[in-house]
Amino acid sequence: MEIVNVLSIAGADPTGGAGIQADLKAIAANGGYGMAAVTALVAQNTCGVRDVHVPPTDFLAAQLAAVSDDVRIDAVKVGMLGTPEVITTVAEWLERTRPPVVVIDPVMVAASGDRLLGAEAEAALQRILPLADLITPNLPELAVIAGAPVAETWDAMLEQAGAVAAQHGVRVLAKGGHLAGPSSPDALVDPSGGVVAFAGARIATGNSHGTGCSLSSAVATRIARGADWATGVGAARAWLRESLQASDALDVGQGSGPLHHFAGLWSRGAVDGAGGTASDIRAEWWDGIAEVRAATDALPFITRLADGSLPREAFLAYVAQDSLYLGEYARVLARLSTLAPDPAAQRFWLHAAQGALIGELELHRDRLDGAPIGAPSPTTTGYTNHLVASCSDEYAVAAAAALPCFWMYSDIGTRLFRGELGERACDPEHPYAEWIAAYDDAAFAADTESAIALVTELAAAARPDLRERMWGAFRISAEWEHDFFRQTAVDGAGSARSADREHLVPVS
Ligand SMILES: Nc1ncnc2c1ncn2[C@@H]1O[C@H](COP(=O)(O)OP(=O)(O)OP(=O)(O)O)[C@@H](O)[C@H]1O
Ligand SMILES: Cc1ncc(COP(=O)(O)O)c(N)n1
């Protein structure tokens, strides 16, 4: 989905709880790109308003033109307007630019009781309201617009909202935050009289500075993203309630503190869980198994494969276990294909499963000449059991478990072929020259890159707990890769499990 651009036209709150500062946070938290043109600078904090400076309206007009001359605007939220001149400036700009979504929060009085709209501007407000798709008055603001006493009951609130909606031809979200009682319901009323009620228990907190600003920005963003009005208001309210519920976790000021705009996002992992990009994860995971890789390089099986001194029996024992392993690995890869959520990943794993089966057949037929393979060793069984068990977790974990087989094998194979693990490996007379050459398979290298990209992209998009399980499964598989190479490299000093020693050929 295209990221929507949402412009707030409102006053400023240097403590960040209301006005444009709250709007920008609310827009971001609800999935939009936030922009702000400032109508008034307000010297305020959580305890109250100290001073208001309204810059010349020419300058406001210049800000608005600077935005609309350059940027596609998907929605506008209008907050504090302050003076009749500001109202006229914004109204003229709205008439000229006709943004697709306009939400006006007719801010008049701060929660602290300080006026944010001059009495003389209340009349001018009537001019701008019809330019809105939705207005979001609280009860005192609704009363001023309706020219009636403040509604004290839900029914009175609905009646006033209905009258205002019909008079100005706009939807009205009448906010019940100021109603007495244990609930804080809102009502979305359209000009033809339709009402959608939103119930909600009142949240016990003294920190509700900026709820109105934040709600109207959230609704504008949700609508710009394609929600219908009832759904958009519902989603914005759900987010607001979550943020209000968490507001006591902040420690901002002595008075009525702000909402915790990002409480939900943070708890779902956007900050501490941010694990970086796929390429960060690639580097981190590869570094994370550096010790296992170094230990694998140093195994007698690898060093003696490289220098050509590996006994034939040990080599064949390895081939037999590898063949057994690949048969099971192919099943795991095929299972990954059935778990994959998209066709590209589904195809990739199926292709990899087929590659593993072909590898198994070739090993069996060409290297072992059809001789009996025997049973899987405890190490082979342990490794494949780990892969199978990972398939009982989420797809991403199973995919992470399958990765070291590609990655470590391809890495060792390439370095072996290039002589980086011993120059003798480059000698055409090397007893395993043909085997070593087969390691340098471009198609396997390409598949390895695809597997790394697939898994690290999954990890980058994963929730923190899932990413941690992925890393755990990956790390354990890397250990098994090491053990798998080690099992045929027993030097008689008990470096492998005794059961492995019994049916594998020691190298010494
Ligand atoms: N204590 C509360 N518990 C649950 N919801 C609340 C509470 N206070 C306000 N709300 C909700 O917050 C939104 C804003 O309502 P409110 O009536 O407070 O508007 P407002 O007065 O314009 O806000 P502001 O505090 O920014 O001036 C509404 O959706 C309302 O239902
Ligand atoms: C710039 C600006 N705009 C709006 C409000 C209203 O918010 P609240 O009623 O929560 O103080 C505010 N205090 N400051």
Image (cartoon, helix red, strand yellow):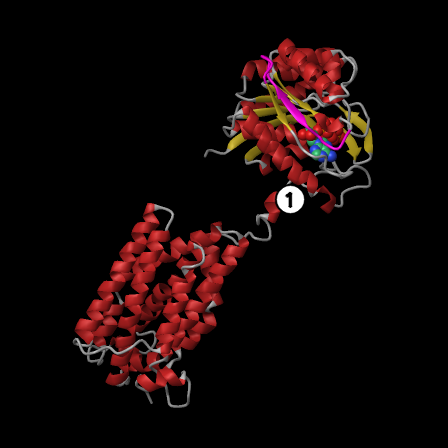
Q: Is residue 368 magenta?
A: no
Under circle 1, the secondary element is: helix
Specify the quadrant that holds the N terminus: top left
Which percent across, then down, holds residue 60?
66, 22
- Residue pictured at 38% horizontal, 62% vertical: 402
Q: Is residue 18 visible?
A: no
- Residue pictured at 79% horizontal, 35% vertical: 45
Q: How many marks?
A: 1
Relative horizontal placement of residue 463, taking residue 478 as reference (left or right): right
Specify the quadrant that holds the C terminus: bottom left
Identify the main secondary structure in magenta. loop
Q: Nearer the viewer, residue 379 or 104?
A: 379
Which percent across, then down, holds residue 80?
71, 23
Q: Quadrant of residue 178?
A: top right
Residue 19 higher or lower than 194, as above or below: below
Task: Confirm or reject: label 1 Cβ below 8 Å from ligand 1.
Answer: no
Point out the stretch of residues depicted in magenta: 181-194
Which percent across, then down, holds residue 245?
69, 41
Q: Which residue is mark 1?
A: 263
Residue 28 higher or lower than 492, as above or below: above
Three-letter code for the amino acid on which mark 1 is drawn: Ala
Q: Residues within 10 Å of mark 1 (few under 14, many from 20)?
A: many
Q: Quadrant of residue 447?
A: bottom left
Q: Is residue 453 visible?
A: yes
- Residue pictured at 45% horizontal, 64% vertical: 473
Which percent across, then down, holds residue 349?
32, 55
Relative horizontal placement of residue 366, taking residue 375 as reference (left or right): left
